[in-house]
Image (tube, grey):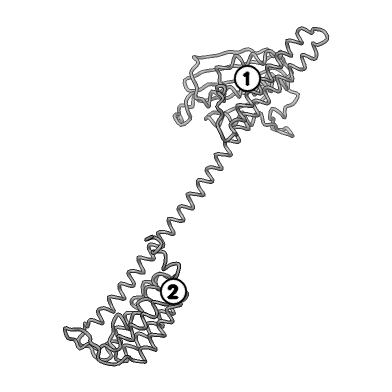
Amino acid sequence: MTAEWSQWPRRHSRAVDVVTSVLLCVGATYASTLIDHGGRQGPEVARAPSLAVFVLSAIASIALLRRRQYPRAVLAVTTACGVVITALGFDLSILTAGAALISVWSVGLWSSDLRTAKLAPLVCGGPLLIASFFHGLMPLLTGGRISAIAGVLVAGALAEAGRNRRDYLSALHARAELAERTREEEARQRVGEERLRIARELHDIVAHHMALAHAQASTAAYLLRSQPDQAQEMLDQLAGTTSAALRELKATVGLLREDDSDAPLEPTPGLAQLPELLASFERTGLTISLSITGVPRPLSPGADLTAYRIIQEALTNVTKHADTPAATVRLVYSRILLTVSVSDDGGSSAESVRGEPDSVSQGYGLIGMNERAVSVGGHLHAGRRPDGGFEVTTELPLEPPNNLDSEDKTR
């Protein structure tokens, strides 16, 4: 209820201005009947209301109705009216100068020029005080003069406080808008990163399983007439490959759903599942040799998944593009780094898929592997070997990147 009443003057500003103007005109006209003899009893009613004071105060009151649009012009009009009333011989008081005091407050609050807002009390109070001395200097400090000067100073102080509060609220609003835009940009950035991560996962899953399924289907077709038993075994492996692909796709695409699924998901792939990964490639006819140097140490979840996916993608490229049935996987553990290399000794029938710089249509395999390595603080190198074949090598930190010093990155 209190909040509604506090907002009423702002919602009905025109009605407030009209009532204020009428009261100021009535007050100035009544003040024209008072005479201050300097006694202890204060001013007393000693004459009839002045028509000149009524006209001048009416002009000043009407001018106040446009104080929001033209604050400086209204200040000039109301101050001039107050000076004329005082010069006609009427006592200077807070009633006769009321319209001018409201103008001082309006200029300080709504004027776009800060210097004008600060000078408004002096521009108004100075002429009024000088005009009050036209009919005698003594006594110097009358009650009317003191009240008028105090009113001018209070009006200026209230305008300064109102302007400071308005600027403070504007700054709060601007900071709130900036914070909202920052949150929206951060949310969009996180959504983009999540989409990129999911796209990378889908690429790895589809490329790996489709390459295996293609190799198994081709082998089964070749063995179907001459060795039907082996062809049947290869078709059974093909069913297992497609089932595994569907499971991983379901788990990855499930990340796009708004609601979490109650069904348990398979654990995130890592080097612990490396034997199963190599076995799936060997079932397609690819011979893989694995060598591990150093003492195996646990990796961070991100680096563990990155190592697994890089090996998976590199072996998929060997299966699809290399003219060799053999590949080598090497894991080298040092104090702070894990070096993973996948190499073959055959040629390449589609170098563009491997990401050669001179390719016409560069594929996304090596781009995705490089992005994975960089995302966990490592780096990747891929290219032809001097003695023939192709090799993918990546170095991954055994600890999160923010825990590594620059000098620790040397081996």
In the image, what residue occupies the spot 27% across and 75% down?
A: 150
Between 14 and 123, the one nearer to me in the picture: 14
Amino acid type, label 1: Val
Amino acid type, label 2: Ala
Residue 99 place in picture, x, y as percent: 37, 80
Query: Circle 1 sits in a helix, a strand or a loop, which is it?
Result: strand
Residue 247, quarter of the rendered image: top right
In the current view of this chain or complex, which residue is farthest to the left?
40
Residue 350 place in picture, x, y as percent: 74, 26
Q: Is residue 264 left or right of residue 328?
A: left
In the image, what residue occupies the spot 70% across and 17% down?
A: 239
Q: Is residue 102 above or below residue 348?
A: below
Q: Is residue 223 left or right of residue 373?
A: right
Density class for disc 1 (Cα within 10 Å; few <14, some 14-19, many ≥20) is many
Q: Is residue 134 visible?
A: yes
Name the quarter where the N terminus is drawn.
bottom left
- Closer to the observer: label 2 or label 1? 2
Density class for disc 2 (Cα within 10 Å; few <14, some 14-19, many ≥20) is few
Residue where numbered disc 2 is placed? 15
Residue 192, quarter of the rendered image: top right
Q: Is residue 411 visible?
A: no
Residue where numbered disc 1 is placed? 342
Q: Earlier in the sequence, mark 2 or mark 1?
A: 2
Residue 221 place in picture, x, y as percent: 80, 15
Residue 96 place in picture, x, y as percent: 32, 83
Q: In whole angstroms, how far apart are the C-alphas of marks 2 and 1?
A: 84 Å
Residue 353, quarter of the rendered image: top right
In the image, what residue occupies the spot 28% across and 84% down?
A: 92
